[in-house]
Image (cartoon, rainbow, N blue to C red):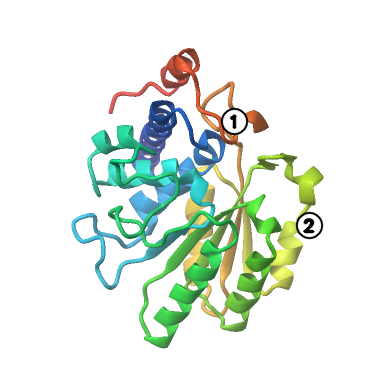
Amino acid sequence: MNEADKKMLAQTARNIRRDIIEQVHSAKSGHPGGSLSIADIITYLYFKEMNIDPADPKKADRDRFVLSKGHTCPALYAALAERGYFSTKELSGFRSLDSFLQGHPDMKHTPGVDMSSGSLGQGISAACGMALSAKLDKKDWRVYSVLGDGEIEEGQVWEAFMFASHYKLSNLCVIIDRNGLQIDGKCKDVMSTEPLEDKMKAFGFNTVVINAHDFDEIESAFAKARAEKNKPTAIIANSVKGKGVSFMENQVSWHGTAPNDEQYEQAVSELAEVR
């Protein structure tokens, strides 16, 4: 990746992280930790990888995105706003009754949202259905879905993985945000899914492990996913929960806690960047 692209992506990711903090602080609720950990992946998807058009959110040949871990929608809303689906001013209405930016993605009211999600484990099933429909219709658009490493403790997820492998959904790219923490503590203590790479390979996935905060590795992983013509791809993205805000990083307490005014000021100061 050239330096100009890398700089653009880094600045955009910083803006998205600041938007995430703005949303959860404004609402006094939300999930900043897991939203921050996927900010770089979301940035790459919406600004480099996916075939999308903010002027035509429902265009038939667009790539689809499903945020299976729907509680981290502040990252998705920030990306959609920064990409031009709606004004960044709308972000201040996050989780308010008169806003279309609810606490989980809503495909009926939010421009750019392809699937409503929130019940963990269900989003990936919908993504598989989308990918199969494209295969049956002989269309070349792709489906991307982000799951949490706590979410994949759900049995339905593994049923969906079996489905994806059985039907050779090579147009499906699953991104597992492996930040190691979930609401109740460390994933390895709550319900370990390791060895995850071996399991994804055993389930028939083209499997790639990356640093979720390195744009060169992210770019390479998505290129490998596009090149695979017989299997679905799983990108295991090793990430830092709360990435970018020093006092939130690797702290399970920031899974679903909004910053107070003092914490907000510190966070936005750390993320300060000229737009």
| Displayed quadrant of residue 208 | bottom right
Pointer 1 local density, CA inside 10 Å: few below 14, some 14–19, many at least 20: many
Is tag 1's residue or tag 2's residue first in the polypeptide sequence? 2
| Displayed quadrant of residue 106 | bottom left
Left-right relation of 35 to 114: right
Q: Secondary structure at mark 2?
A: loop
**Where in the figure is residue 69, as x and y percent of width and height?**
54, 52
201 up-or-down from 236: above or below:
below
Report the residue at 74% width, 65% height from top.
199
Q: Which residue is mark 2?
A: 195
Cα distance between the residues tagged 1 and 2: 26 Å
Mark closer to the observer (1, 2): 1
67 up-or-down from 244: above or below:
below
Pointer 2 local density, CA inside 10 Å: few below 14, some 14–19, many at least 20: few
Report the residue at 52% width, 62% height from top.
123
Q: Which residue is mark 1?
A: 254
For the C terminus, which image quadrant? top left
Q: Is there any visible trace of residue 264 in the rendered image?
A: yes
| Displayed quadrant of residue 4 | top left
Q: Amino acid at mark 1?
A: Trp
| Number of the label disc, if any, that sits on residue 185 | none
Q: Is residue 254 or residue 219 the one in the foreground?
A: 254
